[in-house]
Amino acid sequence: MRLHTAPDHAVVGAVATAIAAAGGIVTAIDVAESSHTRLVLDVTCSAGDAEHADLLVAAADGVEGIEVYKVSDRTFLLHIGGKISVSSKVPLKNRDDLSMAYTPGVGRVSQALADNPEDIPRLTIKGNSVAVVTDGSAVLGLGNIGPGAALPVMEGKAALFKRFADIDAWPICLASQDTDEIVRAVEMIAPGFGGINLEDIAAPRCFEIERRLRASLDIPVFHDDQHGTAIVVLAALTNALRVVGKDLARSRVVVAGGGAAGSAIVTLLLAAGVTDVVVWDREGCLAAGMTGLSDAKAELARATNPRGVTGDLRAGLAGADVFVGVSAPGVLQAEWIQDMAEDAVVFALANPDPEVDPGEAGRYAAVVASGRSDYPNQINNVLAFPGVFRGLLDARAHEVSIDMLLRAAAAIAHVVKDEELNSSFIIPTVFHPDVPGAVAAAIREGTAQDGAASRPAADAPGAGPA
């Protein structure tokens, strides 16, 4: 906060006291200007969240003789001008440099690529580039906020690609939410990219977009909200069940949420050998023969719930070993966990507000994970997608298979060593240096093993017809 005050240095202490009384932490108070008539103070303080920050501003403004002139949020400051940029990898210092990087030399390279298209990934950025594509229809927990408002998220995704896998990614925010237009737009830009990362596109439209692009393009198409989430959930669940001494194949799993993430999680769990999965959504526990379901949910219902469980979420939880929530805040009451099997595992992944408070869930469950960074066991897609695309690009893969996703999940799980594993550490941190390389290696091995064509990842319950 930049504050204007009378030239009374005692006001510095009054400001610090007021902020502390409101629960803030003052980290710096600097005198930016001083004169006979006015002091200009820059006060830096930490707040719990945006609402708390407003309270701290009000507290400072309430000190007699203080005028709050300007307020800056360091998160907004970080975004000024955007978070990514383009830089040249070659020197352009003289005419000789220019003659090779551009005309006339570049013409020789273009002609060579026209004659030998298989060399395009090797001699251009295509071999290390990913398009991060959104229509802005399902951005974080904000919903349908449009492509412009989605741009900071896509920039962040591109920055993560660079940081964790040295991949050049580009935010592509499309001004359409029409499936045909989106598919055609991506098809038209695909020649410049080695892979397509679909992001924050609402279900069920995302299923058809992914399916059609996989069929029409010769580069891998990966919907991170689906498959990235599924990979990390399976990795974390593998280790959580190691902690409680249960077998994945014999565990009963309840998945709350039948959208994009839920459908992909179910698909990967079934592929990993889980036989008893119940999906709960706003219609109740999905079961074969239910009426009024969308095509995607009807397909989910047919592929799951072998015991024919019906009713609400609490009914589905009875005797379950695992709860995985990718739905909405507060749908799970902590006390219901007592209805689950002994040593229950609870993943409450709705973000930023989970299905159940992780602290409350910890009173009843043996292992708890969430999507939040302020609790142990954060389920974060950053553990998956950089390494997945690094492996796909290195292998010059044309598509993504279920077997690759299974290998990626196993790679993440095995980064946590036996001596490290416990109920508060079932998944490595996103900054663990071994994760991207392990995932990339698993993807490359999967490509070599099955030619990237064993079972397309889009052939999933809820993903529509293959």
Image: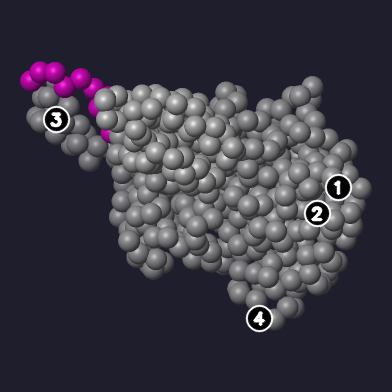
Q: CA distance from mark 4 to mark 2?
A: 30 Å
Colour pattern: one colour
Label 4 Cα neighbours within 10 Å, binned few <14 / some 14-19 / many ≥20: few
Q: In the rendered structure, which disc, 4 or 2, sits on the residue that comes first in sequence? A: 4
The residue carrying mark 4 is 292
Direction from residue 266 to residue 109 in the image, left or right = left
Q: CA distance from mark 1 to mark 2?
A: 7 Å
Bounds of the magenta span?
86-96
Q: CA distance from mark 1 to mark 4?
A: 35 Å
- The x and y percentages for residue 82 are 33, 40
Residue found at x 88% / y 44%: 343
Q: Which mark is residue 58?
A: none
Q: Secondary structure at mark 2?
A: helix
The residue carrying mark 2 is 334
Residue 248 in sight: no
Q: In the rendered structure, which disc, 1 or 3, sits on the residue that comes first in sequence? A: 3
Q: Which mark is residue 364?
A: 1
Q: Secondary structure at mark 3?
A: loop
**CB-based contact (under 8 Å), mark 1 and mark 2:** yes
Residue found at x 71% / y 40%: 236
Q: CA distance from mark 1 to mark 3?
A: 65 Å
Name the mark nearer the viewer: 1 or 3.
1
- The question of residue 93 being in magenta is answered with yes
- Residue type of the residue flagged with mark 4: Gly
- Residue type of the residue flagged with mark 3: Tyr
Quadrant, the C terminus: bottom right
Q: In the rendered structure, which disc, 1 or 2, sits on the residue that comes first in sequence? A: 2
Direction from residue 455 to residue 11 in the image, left or right = left
- The x and y percentages for residue 115 are 23, 39
Residue found at x 70% / y 81%: 291
